[in-house]
Amino acid sequence: SYLALGLGLLACMILTAVAYLYFTSWLATVAAIGVLGLFAANLSGVRQMPGLFGAWALLFLLVRLPHQLEVRLLTLFESLSAKIASVIIDQSGTYHVVQGHLLVIDGYEIEIDKICNGFFSVISMVVLACLYALWRKRPSFHVALLIGCAFVVATLVNVLRISTVGIIYAKAG
């Protein structure tokens, strides 16, 4: 037990040193969460604390994705939302064109990334789903299902936001 705790602390210190040398806050955050996990494991060995692992695992939602991956996911999410919203705007009878990150209606360009809350709405929904699952002590399968539904709900909210702005702009000018 003490050997595992010592090796875990050593690994966290190495991560912290690498984070310091390469000026990356990502590794520093992971190291801090690792230290908190070691502290929680040591504490739960002394005393029974149900739900502590779930609360610790929620801390990993604070870690931002690497920038290139985040940009790719954001682009994918925005384009998916724009394509679905375009179908809804078509059904309302509004002539429009989606060009990359722009929704063009009557020559006016509406930036989709200004309307769409981006990937942060997905993260917010996932955090809420995980908090709910932790609060209600749901099994792992249910948590995975909730996280999947959080992605779908966030996409639908962004589609609703984009299509509403497009339709209202086309009708009101």
Image (spheres, rainbow, N blue to C red):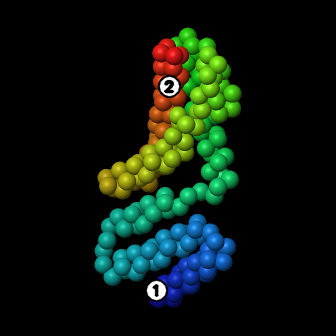
Disc number placed over residue 1 in the picture, else none: 1
Q: Residue furthest top?
A: 93
Identity, as a three-letter code, of the amino acid under mark 2: Val
Between residue 71 and residue 140, name the one nearer to us: 71
On the image, the x and y values in percent for residue 109 come to 62, 26
- Judge the density around disc 1: few (<14), some (14-19), many (≥20) Cα neighbours within 10 Å: few
Count of number-bearing discs: 2
Going 37% across and 53% down the picture, which residue do you hit?
A: 131
123 to 21, vertically: above or below: above
Instruction: From the viewer's perspective, tell me whether residue 98 is left or right of residue 116.
Output: right
Where residue 98 sits in the image (x, y, percent)? 65, 25
Q: Quadrant of residue 78?
A: top right
Whether label 2 touches label 1, CB < 8 Å: no
Tell me where residue 43 sits by quadrant.
bottom left
Q: Secondary structure at mark 2?
A: helix
Q: Which label lies toward us, 2 or 1?
A: 2
User: What crowding class fits label 2: few (fewer than 14 Cα within 10 Å), some (14-19), or many (20 or more)?
Assistant: some
Residue 4 shows in this picture: no
**For residue 21, above or below residue 69:** below
Identify the disc placed on residue 165. 2
Image height check: is 150 above or below 54? above
Residue 50 in sight: yes
Tell me where residue 73 appears, x and y as whole percent.
62, 45
Vertical order, 58 against 103 (above or below): below
* Residue at x 45%, y 48% (from the top left corner): 124
Kind of residue at badge 1 = Ser
